[in-house]
Image (spheres, rainbow, N blue to C red):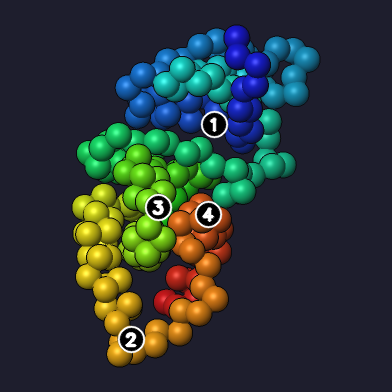
Amino acid sequence: MQKITPFLWFDGNAEEAVRFYTSIFKNSKIGEIRRYGDAGPGPKGSVMTATFQIEGQEFMALNGGPEFKFTPAISFFVNCETQKEVDELWEKLSAGGETVQCGWLRDKFGVSWQIIPKALGELLGDKDPQKSQRVMKAMMKMIKIDVEELKRAYAESSALDLHQEDPGAEDTGSEGQQDAGDDPVHTCGSAGDQQTARDHKG
C-alpha cells in the first residue's frame, strides 16, 4: 500500500465517479468497496468508500455528503505521450463537465484535471528564452493543448528573434517582461480565474 493516497470526497456518487474514471484510463482497476451499516451516518447499504487505481496510483473515494466541494486549487496532472492520448482523455474526462484553459478541465463531478502532452514541458524548457516565450504565448491561447501548434510557434521563433535583434525594428515594449518559460504552470494562472475572465468577455 502506498504511503500517501489522494482521498476524494463525493456527495453520494462516489461509486459512479470510480466507475467513470476506471472506464477512461486503460491501466486502471476498482479495489475494495465498503458500505455503510446500521451505525451510519450514510444510508445502510449505500457505498461509504471505494478504492481504485489509475496507472499504479491508488485513490480512495468517500461518500461524505454535501458539505465540501472540489475546487481547481487541487488538480490531477496527466502526462500524455502523444496528441492522440491528449485528445482521447480530453474528450472523455470533459464529457458532462467543462473545459477551461491551458489544458485544464473540470469533469462532471467537479474534479479538475490537467491533460498535458510531454512535448509542452520540453518546448517550454528550451534554453533559448525567446523560443520558450513563443511557446508560452501560443499555449495561453489554447483550451486543449495542440502539440503541432506549439511546434509551429517554436519553429517560427528564430525568424521573429532575428527581427527583434534588428536595431531598426519597432520597440515592442517588452522591457522588464519575465521569461515565460520560468514558471509555466503559475504563468497560466488559476483555471477558475481564466474561466471567469472569458465569461466577462462574453
Q: Amino acid at mark 1?
A: Asn
Residue 69 x/y as whole percent = 64, 44
Q: Secondary structure at mark 2?
A: loop
Q: Where the C terminus falls, by quadrant?
A: bottom left
User: In the shown orientation, is residue 85 left or right of residue 195?
Assistant: left
Q: Which label sits on residue 13?
A: 1
Q: Amino acid at mark 2?
A: Pro
Give me the residue at 22% from left, 59% from top.
155
Q: Which label sits on residue 167?
A: 2
Q: Earlier in the sequence, mark 3 or mark 2?
A: 3
The residue to which callout 3 is attached is 127
The residue to which callout 4 is attached is 183
Residue 46 visible in image? no
Calculate the distance from the C-alpha at mark 3 to the C-alpha at mark 2.
24 Å
Q: Nearer the viewer, mark 3 or mark 2?
A: 2
Q: Earlier in the sequence, mark 3 or mark 4?
A: 3
Give me the residue at 62% from left, 22% from top.
5
Q: Is residue 63 above or below residue 186?
A: above
Q: Nearer the viewer, mark 2 or mark 4?
A: 2
Residue 138 x/y as whole percent = 33, 63
Q: Earlier in the sequence, mark 4 or mark 1?
A: 1
Counting every numbered tag in the picture gives: 4
| Most foreground residue, 194 or 22 | 194
Calculate the distance from the C-alpha at mark 4 to the C-alpha at mark 1.
36 Å
| Most foreground residue, 167 or 5 | 167
Calculate the distance from the C-alpha at mark 3 to the C-alpha at mark 1.
46 Å
